[in-house]
Amino acid sequence: MSEQRIRDALREIAGSVPVRPDPSAAMVTNSPGTRKSWLVPVMAAAAVVLILAVGLVSWPGGGQQPAAGGEPTLPDRFPAFSHVQGETGGKFGRAIAAYFNGSGHEDFTFGQLILASAEGDRYREIEVPEVDSGLVDTRLSASGTKLVIGGTSMALVDLLTGARREYPGAAGRYVKPLAISPDERLVAYTVADSRGSQGILALLDLSTGQRTQVGTKDVSVAAFSPDGTEIAFDEGYPDRDELLIARLDGTIARRIVTPPRSSLAGANSWSPDGKWLVVISREPDRYEGQSIWAGDPSYVFLDTAGKAGQGPAPVPAKGIVPAAWGDALLGWRSPTSMLVSGGDVDGTTSNLIVEVNVLTGSREIVSRFAVGPRDDLAVGDVQLATGLLDGIGIRHSTSPDRGIWPAWAIVSTSVCLAPFVVAVILWWRKRSRAVLR
Amino acid sequence: MTQPVDVRDDAWFCAVYEDQFASLVRLAFVTTGGTASAEDLVQDVFADLYRRRAQVSDPAAWLRRATVNRCTSWVRRRVLERKHARPEPVTVEVPLGPDAVAVRKALAQLRPRHRAAVFLRYYLDLSDADIAAAMQCRPGTVKSLLHRGLNVMKEHLR
């Protein structure tokens, strides 16, 4: 194809973009703030010096340790991605949250699974394997003391002791943990051909290793009932307009008709009293000329006994579905107050945790995930320790304790600094000799 | 807390908006591949311009530079999200002619900065110097971006 044809085609593509100029859409806050051009490099240099000081001089001894058995709280702010994030081998203590944190470039992407302490501003990366160039799926238990790691097999990590137990997978298949039962004995998981695919639902007894198949195929979300006796799941999303509820022996107890284009809101979709199941339902896409607008989502509450029209009225969910990926409903702070993963409630693209009252629909941002000044940090798959959320307090976050730098950072920084230190020593010795003469 | 300001009171800003908005949305669309994201990103750029209007002497160049920067950041984040997210239902394509469909597919194979360079040259007809200013790089780098971008596109257009 000639460059002229490319030019014409490009003009056709660009011309197909519907553009509606409207300056009023650029309503902004008036914060002119004159910033000096030298300020950024100076601040960056100061930050580097500070990081070096914290990472190499202050540590160890400066990191705050968790108050064992303290009251769990949820931070109002989670720290941004950092390349010098400290790691844990598994013995971390009780976690209030686990989430993906990453920074991306077209050539170099970085992803971390971060654990956030339930008792203080302590954050650690926990190493998980990659499959198909992405971190494997994980699931945090209700008490925040266990982490199940999927992939080509399944692993259970005890976050209090660091003990790890492996459960073999099937060759060439991907194991994805979907939910952990409230008593933390069972894991609902799927086995699929690849990461990201729907798969066959099964239950694994973590104490005996016994497995029970539940669904037949194409399951992507599952949620245990609060009493742990049943499990609800989507089968064949997005084509089927029903949820299945199964007993723990794998037999189907009942089916619940859902609105069109609905899916379970995640592993915490049962209300704490077991009366409702929460699904996200989407309006049909709208066509306006050549533009296609995605239909607005709503949280819809379905009676778990299958009776129509019993639950609270649907709650509009625009802006309070995950900005990236992961469960939409993160847990319940009270029987009528759910914590959801949000995207742009306040006009930003920050990832948020938003508290929504299911009776009134009122919402309040309780926590934010930093996405960087250029909005190029990714946060996804936010999970909370759901058993700690009832009436949980929100703590004001101060400076996060990220732990000691990873080994590669210490080594490379030391190598870079070594010539400078040697040069200073040589200069000092030369100067001392000159003074003595 | 600061109060929202209605930018329609600012004639200079409105004129710049009227003049530049469409081409910037198209630039953002070609770079990001989505209409909604393109509009959001360009709105953010204009909001930023409004805050800095006292310091911006060449708004067109500043807007192009800011749009390319924001789009590149946005694509970087999406790269990560796509790697980890559950696949979403298929979106519907806007009908285009065969050449445009082929070029759009070829553009999707490029990195965001290459896409931006191709758009700035072949849609906005900017010179190497202007593209360099928009992309905060040297004119020599623009030549390289265009050369590599077109080569990749032609490879996919055969």
Image (cartoon, coloured by chain):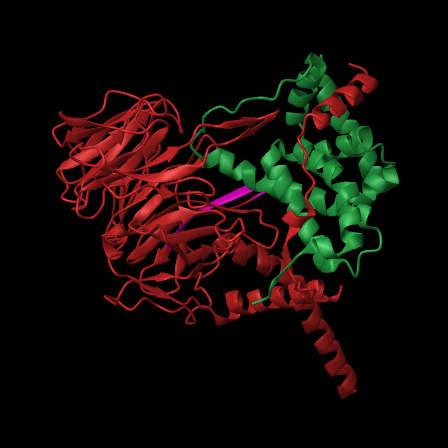
Chain colours: A red, B green
In this view, which residue lies farthest toward the bottom? A436
What segment carries the magenta color? A104-115
Residue A243 image offset from top left, x and y in percent? 25, 28
Q: Residue at x 82, y 39 (%)?
A: B131
Residue A239 image offset from top left, x and y in percent? 35, 21
**Figure check: B112 above or below A251:** below
Instruction: Say which quadrant the C terminus of chain A sits in.
Output: bottom right
Classify residue B139 as left or right of residue A164: right
**Figure check: A59 above or below A268:** below
Classify residue A373 as left or right of residue A34: left
Residue A127 image offset from top left, x and y in percent? 40, 46
Magenta span contains residue B69: no
Instruction: Say which quadrant the N terminus of chain A sits in.
Output: top right
Q: Nearer the viewer, residue A104 or A386?
A: A386
Q: Residue at x 71, y 66 (%)?
A: A39
Q: Residue at x 40, y 29 (%)?
A: A196
